[in-house]
Image (cartoon, helix red, strand yellow):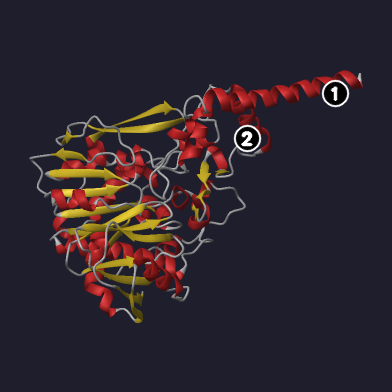
Amino acid sequence: MKQPVQTLFVFVFLAMLGCGGWLYWYVFAESKFVEKAKWEGHAPAGITNAYEQEFTRQLSGQRHPIVTGLAALKWDALDISFIRKVEKGREGWLFLKEEVPGRNELLQSLGIRPYRDLERKLWNLIITQRAEWAGSLGMRYVMVVVPNKTTVYPEYLPARYRPANVELINRSLPDPPGVMVINLTRDLIGQKSLGQLYHKNDTHWNELGAFAGYQSLMRALPPEFRETPLPLDSAELQWVTEPGGDLARLLLMDHVLVEKAPRVALRNPRAKCEINCDEPFGPWMAAKHFRNPRARLPKVFFDHDSFFKTVTPFVAEHFQETIFSWVWQGFHQDVIEATRPALVVDEFVERSLIGDRPRNVPPVLQHYWQQHFNTLPQVAQQACHSLRQAFRQIEMIRAEKDELPVVALELTPASATRLIVEYDDKEVFYPLEAGKKNTIYLEWERPRVKDLRVEGELKAPVWVRVGVY
C-alpha cells in the first residue's frame, strides 16, 4: 500500500511542475508577458509594480483554476493570502499593507510608520516648488489629500490592531508653508452615515465615497473657487453587484469576492466631455477636457491619481472648463502652462506621500532654485576641467542625513545642446544655449544620480557650486 501512495505522490508532484512550466512558456512568454509589464518612471501605476500587476491579472479569474483554487483554499481555510500585500479584515473587508518597499498603508494609517524628518521636509519642498511655479504664471495652487481606506475604516481591521488618532496622523502629513492643503479625512469619516464609502475588496472609495469627497472639496476650495456642492438627491443612487477590485485581484479571487457597490449618476448633468473623451481613464492618459458654459467658476486643472476618475462628472458641473490629467504623484507642467487654468488642484492619496517621491520636472525645479539657491548654506565651489570631474567632485561632498545637496552647474557649450542627467530610473534633459553661460540646478539625489553628460563640446571649465537644503 505504501509503494502505490508514494508513486502517486511523485506523479502528482511532477504534474504540478509540468503545469507550472506550461503556464510560463505557453501563457506568459508566448503572450509577450515581459513586454506588457513595462512601466514608466520609478513609481508604480497602481497598488503594485507592473510585473506583479500583470502576473496576477493573467492568473486571476477562471483562466487557471488550479492556481486560483489553491489561493482560495489558503485564504478560506488558513487565512493566508496568495500575496503578502493584503490583510484580511473583519466582515469581508480587505486592506492593503506594503504595496512597494517603503510604502506601507497599514502602518501609515495606524501611526506606526511616521514620517522621517527629511522625508517630510522634501515633500514640503516638492509641493512648494509646484505652488511657486504656478503662482509665477498667475495660477492658484491647492494640494488635496484623499485618506487611505485604512484611515477611514480602521474598525474593520483585525482585532489585534489598535486604530491611531486621526489628528495625529494628519499632523504628520506634509504642510508646506504658504500652500493651501485640503485634507478630506475628517469630512469623510464624518459622512460614513451616508453608507459604505469605500469598496470592501479594493483600495479605492466607491462612487458614493467619491460623491462625498467631491462635496467636501467644493466646500473647502479657496473662497474665489468655492461653491455649494450638489446634494445627493440630485443624483440617482443604485446598488449593483460587481466583481472584486484590485485587492481581490491580488488574491486571485476577484471572481469570488464580489460585492454590492453604489452607482451615482447625476440626473441632469450640464458638463460635457469635449476632448479625449473616448480614451479610458488610466495612468499617463491624454488630458480630458470637460466644459459647462453655464458654470460660474473659471477654468481648473486637476492633476490626480486613480481616486479622482469617479469624481470627474461631479466637479465638472461647477467650472466653465475642467481638465483632468492622471499620473501617480506627477505634475503636468507642460499641459498646465499650455492651458493656463485659474486654479491647479494637485490630488494625492494619503499613502502616496510616503516611500518613493516624485522628481519635479526641470522647468518647475529651475524656477524655484533660481529664486532660492543663494539663500542656502554654501559648502563647495570649484572649477572643473570636465563634466566627469565635476561629477566626481560632487559625489565626494558629504551632507548630513537630514540635508539635501543642491548643485548649481555653470556650463558654456560651443553650440546649442543639452545636459543629460542619468538617474537610476530615467534620463532628464536640460536645454543649453550656445556661447553663453547656462546655470542648471540639480537636487543631488544620492545614490540615484548615476551620470552627467553633454552632447557636444564645452567651451569653458565647468563651475560647480553646492548648497545644502
Q: CA distance from mark 2 to mark 1?
A: 28 Å
Camera-side residue: 181 or 284?
284
Q: Nearer the viewer, residue 98 or 445?
A: 445
Name the residue carrying label 2.
Answer: 75
Name the residue located 61 percent from the left edge and 31 percent from the top edge: 71
Observer able to see residue 175: no
Q: Amino acid at mark 2?
A: Trp
Of 162 and 442, the residue lying toward us:
442
Taking the spot 90% from the left edge, 20% from the top edge, the residue there is 3
Which residue is label 1 attached to?
A: 6
Which residue is at a point 17% across and 41% down the rendered structure image? 317
Q: Secondary structure at mark 1?
A: helix
Q: Which tag, 2 or 1, sits closer to the chain's start?
A: 1
Q: Position of residue 305 (x, y in %)?
A: 34, 46
Q: Give left or right: position of 369 versus 62.
A: left
Asked which secondary structure carries label 2, the reply is: helix
Disc 2 vs disc 1: which is toward the camera? Answer: 1
